[in-house]
Amino acid sequence: MNPYETEITEPVKGIFRIPIPVPLPLKFVYAYAVMDPQGIWIIDLGMDVPEARQVWASADQTLGLSARGVAGVIVTHYHPDHIGLAQFAYDLWHAPIHLLEGEIAVARRIFEDNPTAIDMATFLQKNGAPAEEVLFLKREENARRTIVHLPTELVALEDGQRIPLSDTTLQIIQQSGHTDHQAVIYDEARQVLFCGDQILSRITPNISLWPDSDPNPLASYLSSLNRLKEYPIRMGLPAHEHLIDDLNSRIDAIIAHHYERGDEVEQLLDEPQTGYQVARRLFKRPLNPYQMRFALSETLAHLEYLRLAQRIARDDGEFIRYRHR
Ligand SMILES: [Zn+2]
């Protein structure tokens, strides 16, 4: 099956799935339009690149979004492939753009305060990344200024908030791990879950340790996922790849994957090593600096999870090294 559906579909009555192209290996982010007579709700937007604007302009016509009126937009999390077009969407529909409150703060800090890459560089160096991979940060810092544009007003959502529509209610559920405050949205009447990047059908969502964020993102991720199992869910509507028919078994598979990965990481610590050294051994294929950084930050999420569970120990010196206890 082609993981990259390219046409607008209606997987559940009244909900349209709109493929928005992104210049990433995942090829598309899938936005959703909940067609309520009182006003349409849009979930996720895409990165601010010309081809994505074009697709939105044509979807706006095809689905009659502007004509019928958009009541609100929910951006699941602050990553550029979801939030990038926030200003564009605001200009197009004059509708409020919502994110969970904590996520707004992170988005403002990263995309507007333009933090220098110093903290990140120190973090990478201490965890053993070589200089050329640290330098790569600078290029990225420049790139991120062009692909994300935020409106002056972003409206804060709260965990558990319920948004009443005419034939259903959208319930906001806060999830952590992929970002610290990702909103997934439960459509109560249709019993479907808009799961953002929290649960994907084929790949395991990236769970990474970064400076200035959750010190144990993997633990937060696993407990977030368990919370979702309480909801009766007939289908998962993720922001990338396929629809998910059996969300609970996909959740179980992702949890099992992380447990196995944790054991693997623990076994690799035959001698004290930096996170970078462990990542090189864990990800056997050659990686470019961008992929290597994700490999490192994912490995660090596992190492910190194991350390905080008292399974391994850490020594802090010029470099941070992990070892058996
Ligand atoms: Zn994404």
Image (tube, rainbow, N blue to C red):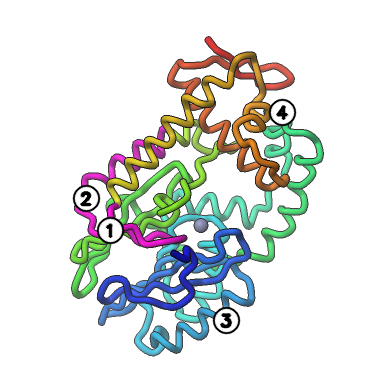
Single out the residue that lies furthest toward the front. Answer: 1
Task: Check disc 3 and give the amino acid type.
Answer: Gln
Disc 3 target residue: 54
Q: Secondary structure at mark 2?
A: loop
In the visual, does 208 lie left or right of 233? right
How many labels, in total?
A: 4
Could you tell me the amino acid type at mark 2? Tyr
Frontmost residue, 38 versus 18: 18
Residue at numbered disc 2: 231
Q: Is residue 69 left or right of residue 58?
A: left
Comes first in the chain, label 1 or label 4: 4
- Quick one: quadrant of the N terminus? bottom left
Task: Tell me which numbered mark, 2 or 4, is placed earlier along the sequence.
Answer: 4
291, above or below 97, in the image: above
Determine the residue positioned at 45% across, 16% down. 310
**Residue 196: x, y in percent?**
42, 57
Which residue is identified by label 4?
Answer: 128
Query: Mark 1 or 3 closer to N-term?
Result: 3
Task: Give left or right: position of 292 versus 191.
Answer: right
- Residue marked by disc 1: 186
**What stretch of residues is rendered in magenta?**
219-246
Question: Horizontal and vertical percent for residue 61?
Answer: 45, 89
* Labels 2 and 4 touching (C-beta < 8 A): no
Q: Is residue 3 visible?
A: yes
